Image: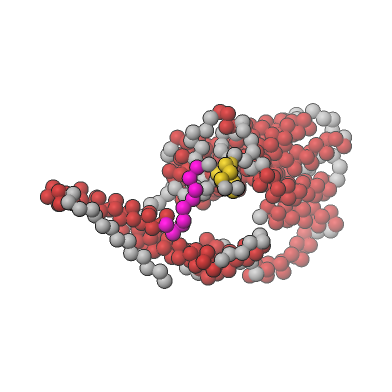
Amino acid sequence: FHDFINNGLSCPGLVAHSLGHYIAILRFLPLLVLVRVFPESPDWLKEKGRYEEVGRIFEVIAQANGRELTPEYIINMKRRFRIEKSMQEERKRNGTETRYSVWDLFRGSNTCKKSTAIIFIWFTSTTASVGLSLYSFELEGDLYLNFFVSAGAEMAAAAMVVVAVGWCGRRCSFCLGSALGGALTLSIAFIQAGTTSRLSMFVVAKLSISSSSVVLPLWTSELLPLVVRSIGMRMTDLIGLMGPIALPFLFNQGRKSSGVPLLTLGSLQIAGALVALLLPETIHQKTLHTLQDGEEFGKHATWRDCFRLGPPRQEAKNGILKNRGPQPQSPILSLLRRQDSLRRASSEGDQDHSDPQSESSTDQGPVVETVKITVV
């Protein structure tokens, strides 16, 4: 996704340098026809019950990654989607559907700590990334060339992140990129204007900060539980965009003191890297489905864990590396157990309002619960 954004950022610099007329934008209007070629969102197709198209999209993704999906996997996936939809409709009819809000991100102590840290990191990272892009116009030399070099640094950062996130993890990639970019930004403020080293350090700083900005959405989506992931991503993105609002005032202050913008952006980036050390690593970890999973994840981390960079250690068993902790269950089995627990909870609520004679009769034998599943 960031590759397309970075490619789009690099085009205006070249077009404006070669033509200089806004009429050149008309050449890109025919490209809007390609919108019909793009596939629909799998989540939207799942909500509409178009499971066949979801399966075809997953097969294309698997082929692009050199994998092959078995027919059993596709069948089980469609069954899981249908079971989830039937359970959701049943909860709507019974009035027991759970609605999540932004406040669910701050209910537990550990969840509140992680959500606050994520919001602060998004604020600092977005402000520093947009600020350095705007600072390219303050550099000496050709205006269009500086903007193109800044966009090219973002393209290189996206390519580096593909390797970095799988090799050293999400947290290590973000912290190193943020700390290096912040340190270089602070150093640029003390270098004489018009030198080649100043431009070189700016490119490396932009490369580092852009790499951390690419890692941040992936890391955030894995830190947030699945039930509040979309709400949390929208909230953090919205709060992060509040920082660039103050950038014009910051650069206006830089006319009086040229080092103020760079010192501010570098300090924000280093502060974001330090706060990111409080968050756990998510690589090779199971997906967080519920709010309870999000509360327990990283709850017992120590201060020593904050400064341990890299992927978590794995244990070898029968020649296969496995993560510490419980292994994920089958999706269909988890859904069946969840439905069984909901019905048990409702039956226990009905027994609380019954007479004592009925309670004594239940002690005579085990209660048999039946779960009915309809597969279309």
In the depicted view, which residue is nearer to us: 136 or 287?
Answer: 287
Q: Is residue 16 left or right of residue 296?
A: right
Q: Residue at x 64, y 35 (%)?
A: 309
Q: Residue at x 75, y 38 (%)?
A: 205
The image position of residue 108, as x and y in percent, is: 43, 38
In the depicted view, which residue is nearer to us: 160 or 190?
Answer: 160
Q: Residue at x 52, y 48 (%)?
A: 286
Dividing the picture into quadrants, the one containing residue 195 is top right
Magenta extent: 325-333
**Picture layout, residue 366 above or below residue 73:** above
Asked if residue 333 shows in the view, the reply is yes
Residue 142 belongs to the span the image colors magenta: no
The image position of residue 324, as x and y in percent, is: 53, 41
**Location of the C terminus (image quadrant):** bottom left
Q: Is residue 105 left or right of residue 239?
A: left
Q: Is residue 281 left or right of residue 100?
A: right
Residue 330 belongs to the span the image colors magenta: yes
Asked if residue 131 shows in the view, the reply is no
The image position of residue 50, as x and y in percent, is: 50, 69
**Location of the N terminus (image quadrant):** bottom right
Dominant secondary structure of the residues highlighted in magenta in the image: loop
